[in-house]
Amino acid sequence: MQPMSQTRLAAIHPALSELCMHLARIADVRAAAALLEWDQETYMPAGAASVRAEQLATLHQLAHEWLISERTGELLEAAAAAVQDLPAEHLAVRLVEVVREDYEKARRIPPALVAALARTESEACEAWKQARQEDNYARFAPYLERLLTLNREKAEALGYEAHLYDALLDQYEPGMTAADVQRLFEQLRVHLVPLAQAFSAQPQPEHAFLQRYVDPERQWRLNRMLLKAIGFDLQRGRLDASVHPFSTGIAIADVRLTTRIDPHDFTSGLFATLHEAGHGLYEQGIDPVLERTPLADGASLGLHESQSRLWENLIGRSLPFWEYFFPHLQQLLEGVLDDVSLEAFYRAINRVQPSLIRVEADEVTYNLHILLRFELELALLEGNLSVQDLPEAWNEGMQRYLGLQPTTLREGVLQDIHWSQGAFGYFPTYTLGNLMAAQLWRALTAALPEAVICMQQGDFQPILTWLRERIHTYGRAWKAPVLLEQVTGRPLEVEPWLTYIREKYQALYPAASVSLL
Ligand code: ZN
């Protein structure tokens, strides 16, 4: 009997087996690193922090060296010759093309720059943590300055056509440019700022009952019940606890999710679980033939986020979803919600309230936080905004977009970890994900008009199958814009999301005066 990996490689194309063996070794080292990273956030004893950082640096360096080696180049050349007569959409052709792109990009960045980035990112992350604690921006500013310089160098090394930002965005959202994001975000901004104001000016629904005590053990049962119901396979995945919920694919057959459990805020963990499950369903749905290849991943961060937002918001905060689950929830929480109606619960989990903190923002105001971050990081990279002036620009932007003023840096410019990790070009993917989710949902409900009835009956299989066959199965074989256009017949647009938000929230806040498109 052939080892499993052999069978899988042969299934892609026999001529690729040598390249695939090489790629599988790289994938294994990366999987080991991902598992160590997961452990770092879940079970690792605090004392292991510094040795863990060394272990991770070794593994990442090893994977990088193997990828940029001459050997990869030779194997790619042989593989390209072997697949040249296959149709362009053959998985083997896609594999060769994606790996060639990865290989060429990785080789463009000089090793000294890779090392300088890694070192500065880890120092900046520590400085950011301290700066946050002390509420002292000056502590973090010099690191931010250095990271910007290094990222400008990285963009130059990677190369770009129109805008330096394109090269950085491409790391997270291949196939999209700064100009695409600017155009979409401007269309969104014009409609969203007045929409958010109109809804948030309305009286808030009763929601104090969401803060009632719910025993952690019961919350775990609730979250696992939801995971199973929507089709997350716990034989090929896990759910654990971490301070900041996340998901990570160690392999297609091993997808780890985390959530947070707060005894006085059970819906926080519940929606975090649904969100991470959306990411996890994507990873579990990738064609198993792609296991241990670089295609065993999401097409982009935006498309990944579209899956998490779809399950968290479009499904998980919808009325049909709770028409099925609310009685189960009441039963599981044994009395905690007995005096609460389905309608009151639905209103409470969908209240619109501008807030200072991005990760606590509701579905309507969330994207305003992203518009601000995109605007600022673009200005920083272009040199139109100095690091020194960033806190003031942040506060001014918060006022303009959300009508709020942070009183501390912790709830202002120092709230997110991303910039301290050198992740410029990352923030837009959250909003792109929201937009993609609405566009995919429109296509899904047009193709499956029974989707609403299925949700009311607690049957999520037809929805999951539709997503699996059209999105998940391809992994990274196609770029997100290609998949989206293939599935929805349209390039990415803001209209489906705006229409979804208008319709849903106009029903929740009927007194708000909202203009139609
Ligand atoms: Zn996410």
Image (tube, rainbow, N blue to C red):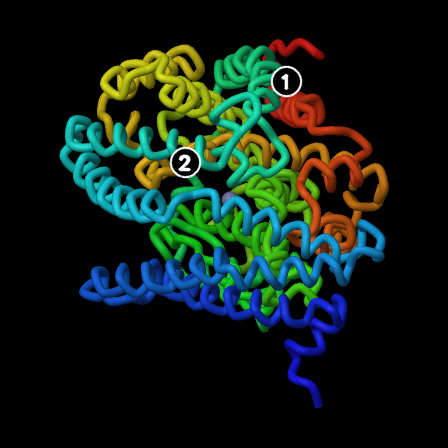
Image position of 38 with respect to 136: above or below: below
Residue at left offset 62%, top offset 24%: 505
Q: Which of the pair 290/61 is nearer the observer? A: 61
Which badge, 2 or 1, is on the more N-terminal residue?
2
**Within the image, what quadrant is residue 479 found in?**
top right
* Residue at 54% in and 33% down: 350
Q: Which residue is mark 1?
A: 510
Specify the amino acid type for callout 1: Pro
Q: Tell me the quadrant of the picture where the C terminus can be found.
A: top right
Q: Are marks 2 and 1 in contact (CB under 8 Å)?
A: no
The residue under label 2 is 154
The crowd level at tag 2 (other Cα within 10 Å; few <14, some 14-19, many 20+) is: many
- Residue 89 visible to the viewer: yes
User: Is residue 109 left or right of 161 when viewed as pictured?
Assistant: left
Residue 242's x, y, as percent? Answer: 36, 56
- Residue density around tag 1, few if under 14, some if 14–19, many if 20 or more, within 10 Å: few
